[in-house]
Image: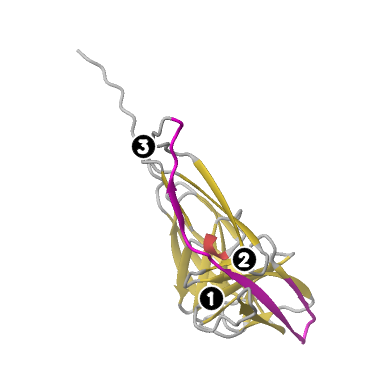
């Protein structure tokens, strides 16, 4: 008789979160819009791995186990940023509070030479110190975002059509008073291209899972670093 040990990898069971958008008085905001959810530890837009449309003030998501931070984009309102903890194949209900905005921030996104990004879709995302989230999108030209005044917002831009990299480590800060408007410019930097190659050891053998780092400096003098690892054949590709 032979005894064999078998290891079975178990995937996280899906969890369902049913969200309702409410105003500061707890009444449902029966509007359409978008809802974004991400890992709370992430700080910029590409981390929003869950995206959904909202109908009549409600939206539903299926999440793996973990913490998920969600906010809504609804015309006329600024969203709170609640965190929901999901585990064990559960179904939960939650609310995202929306506050009617009373100020406006207009953001222009330009390249490193000061030229407006007019032919690509991009988003502007940010939040205040109290967690109030703001976001806006454009197919080219400036982005006007309704916000709650008397706050300072930290803003970042993300060009969705590719070819540009944002300096996420140095966001733009804008302060706007209630009943007022403010403007800002965010610079994005043209991605210079893709660097590929192969890492070998002293004997010429390909090295897998080797850490590779490259840096580049744009015409404006801004330096970016790109990192990655080699695959099983020792090859790497850095964008």
The numbered dot on residue 218 is 2
**Residue, disc 1:** 122
> Residue 23: which quarter of the image?
bottom right
The answer to whether residue 90 shows anywhere in this view is no
C-alpha span from label 1 to label 2: 21 Å
- Which residue corresponds to mark 3? 9
Q: SS of the residue at dot 1?
A: strand
Q: Residue 81: where, in percent of width, then height?
A: 62, 65
Image spot of residue 20 (x, y percent): 53, 70
Magenta extent: 173-202
Q: Position of residue 177 (x, y in %)?
A: 80, 81
What secondary structure characterizes most of the magenta part? strand
Label 3: which secondary element? loop
Q: Residue furthest top?
A: 1
Please tell me which residue lies in front, 131 or 166.
Answer: 166
Mark 2 vs 3, N-terminal side: 3
Q: CA distance from mark 2 to mark 3?
A: 45 Å
Mark 2 or 3: the one toward you: 2
Figure check: 67 above or below 170: above
Q: Is residue 204 toward the left or the right of residue 191 in the image?
A: left
């Amino acid at each position: 008789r032979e005894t064999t040990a078998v290891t079975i990898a178990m995937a996280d069971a899906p969890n369902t979160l049913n969200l309702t958008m409410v105003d500061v008085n707890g009444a449902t905001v029966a509007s359409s819009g978008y809802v974004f959810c991400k890992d709370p530890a992430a700080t910029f837009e590409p981390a929003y791995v869950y995206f959904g449309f909202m109908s009549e003030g409600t939206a539903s998501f299926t999440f793996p186990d973990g913490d998920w931070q969600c906010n809504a984009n609804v015309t006329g309102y600024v969203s709170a940023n609640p965190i929901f903890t999901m585990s064990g194949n559960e179904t939960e209900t939650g609310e995202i509070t929306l506050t009617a905005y009373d100020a406006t921030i207009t953001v222009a996104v330009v390249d490193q030479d000061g030229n407006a990004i007019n032919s690509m879709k991009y988003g502007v995302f940010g939040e205040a110190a109290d967690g109030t989230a703001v976001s806006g999108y454009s197919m080219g030209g400036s982005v006007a975002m309704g916000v709650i005044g008397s706050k300072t917002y930290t803003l970042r831009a993300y060009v969705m059509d590719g070819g540009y990299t944002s300096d996420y480590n140095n966001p733009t800060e804008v302060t706007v008073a209630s009943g007022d408007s403010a403007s800002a410019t965010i610079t994005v930097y043209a991605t210079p291209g893709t660097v590929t190659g192969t890492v070998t050891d002293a004997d010429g053998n390909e090295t897998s899972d080797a850490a590779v780092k490259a840096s580049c400096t744009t015409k404006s003098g801004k330096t970016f670093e790109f990192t990655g690892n080699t695959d099983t054949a020792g090859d790497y590709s850095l964008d």
